[in-house]
Image: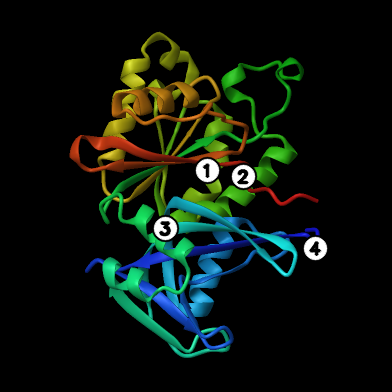
Amino acid sequence: MSHSSIAAAGAVAWQPDGTVAVVHRPRYDDWSLPKGKVDAGETVPHAAVRELAEETGFRVVLGRHLNTVRYSVRGAAKRVDYFAARAVDGSFEPNEEVDELRWLPVDKAREILTYPQDADVLTEFARLPLETTSVLLVRHAKAGKREGWHAPDIERPLSPAGLRQAGALRSMLPLFGADRMYAAPPVRCVQTIAGLAEDLGRTVAIEPVLGEQEYSGDPDAGLRRLREIAAGEGIPVVSSQGGVIPGLISSCAKESGLDLPEVRAKKGSVWLLTFVHAGLGLAAADYYPSPLPKP
């Protein structure tokens, strides 16, 4: 990363009672949301989870992306990406960066924060209910070229680059609480999340209506199945194809009145879809390119 640009990540960490974490940094004598710099080779979601653990002592599960805050630090442009993050467990101990942590209702937290941009992040956090439903919609990782594969296309496996992408997803998806696995029938879709399923002691359920072949004939059936999966417990991962993902997301967004830019779906990428419980309306959709670190 160049010296003229600094990437950082932080979160609004929340508890089921509706309180959120604000921290006091003695170095600056300020009250802020916990955040910190992205390390070399680290993804923004990884940095957010690590920084929350280091500054607050709490393990968190990431939810939707909230705001991107930009400002200048000693002539360098700084970008901070903030997430909603459910605090799972942990306890605070004063450390080098933070000497006090307070769990406060959102309105009280807004009053104590030093910086207006942190208050804006809280406003975005409070826009949706605490408890939402998430789906991690993954496009399968890179597979070998179709013209070089002479068996049925459904059996075409991941390439070495695709296996590396799948390994990176195996590390990133748990940050968002992934705990159920579904895949379209092609081998490459299953392989993309098989390592994570193994880590979690889960099996990958095959979903024909979420594969290109069946989806093209009945998109509504695919949409219904996605909503059924979303309505279950936990955070599902659905591994599908480029001919399915943009249509699914666009249909969900249209039904919910959510205005989205172009729906991209590059290989190894992830969409975090956030639904509100009532009627499973799509409230947010965040796109993450393949988390494979650049060589």
Q: Which residue is mark 3?
A: 120
N-terminal label among 1 and 4: 4
Coordinates of residue 268 in the picture (x, y in percent): 61, 38
Q: How is the image coloured?
A: rainbow
What SS does tag 1 mark?
A: helix
Task: Check whether the beta carbons of the residues at disc 3 and disc 2 lie within 8 A of each other.
Answer: no
Q: Nearer the viewer, mark 1 or mark 4?
A: 4
Q: Which residue is mark 2?
A: 166
Q: Specify the quadrant that holds the N terminus.
A: bottom right
Coordinates of residue 239 in the picture (x, y in percent): 49, 35
Q: Which residue is mark 1?
A: 193
What SS does tag 4 mark?
A: loop
Task: Check whether the beta carbons of the residues at disc 1 and disc 2 lie within 8 A of each other.
Answer: yes
Identify which amino acid the numbered label 1 is placed on. Ile
Coordinates of residue 88 in the picture (x, y in percent): 35, 69
Q: Is residue 128 above or below residue 74?
A: above
Q: Is residue 135 above or below residue 131?
A: above
Q: Nearer the viewer, residue 109 or 57?
A: 109
Q: CA distance from mark 1 to mark 4?
A: 36 Å
Q: Nearer the viewer, mark 4 or mark 3?
A: 3
Say the numbered circle drawn on residue 3.
4
Identify which amino acid the numbered label 3 is placed on. Asp
Query: Residue at position x 30%, y 24% from top?
Result: 255
Query: Residue at position x 80%, y 59% from top?
Result: 2
Q: Nearer the viewer, residue 83 or 158?
A: 83
